[in-house]
Image (tube, grey):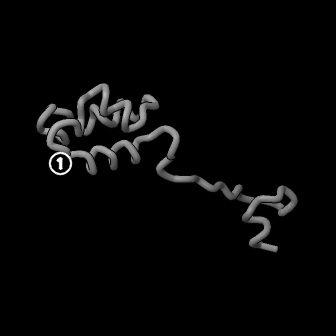
Amino acid sequence: MIVCVCRRVSDRDIARHARAGMDFSDIQFELGVATQCGQCECSAREIVDQCSATAPVAAIRRDPAGCGGDCGCAGAAARA
């Protein structure tokens, strides 16, 4: 989907750069997104936030099956 109509920048272009470790200002400089009319800035920033390598989308907590309670995991504390 085209996010920035003025510069014809797609959500895929923005996501690819964000996953490569670029922040919004780097992407703005590189692609020109949100540098003309500014209507796309909120959408572009949202895509960067969702795809940023420094801000994972979800944190995964693992509770091993069969935990005996001596490992110190959160699941062991809940069962105690």
Asked if residue 40 lies left or right of residue 62, the reply is left
State the residue lying farthest toward the right.
Answer: 70
- Give the x, y percent position of residue 19: 42, 33
Q: Name the residue at 73% across, 65% down.
A: 75
Residue at position x 40%, y 46% in the image: 49
Q: Position of residue 69 (x, y in %)?
A: 83, 63
Which percent across, then down, holds residue 21? 46, 31
Residue 25 placed where, x, y %?
A: 37, 35
**Foreground of the two, 72 or 28:** 28
Q: Is residue 43 left or right of residue 51?
A: left
Left or right, residue 29 beside residue 18 = left
Instruction: Please identify the quadrant where the C terminus is shown.
Output: bottom right
Quadrant of the rendered structure where residue 71 is? Answer: bottom right
Read off the residue under disc 1: 39
Under mark 1, the amino acid is Gln
Q: Secondary structure at mark 1?
A: loop
Q: Residues within 10 Å of mark 1 (few under 14, many from 20)?
A: some
In this rendering, the answer to whether 14 lies above or below 79 is above
Residue 62 vs residue 53, the one in the foreground: 53
Residue located 68% across and 58% down the image: 63
Image quarter of residue 47: top left
Q: Which residue shows up at 71% across the image and 55% down it? A: 64
The quadrant the N terminus occupies is: top left
Frontmost residue, 72 versus 11: 11
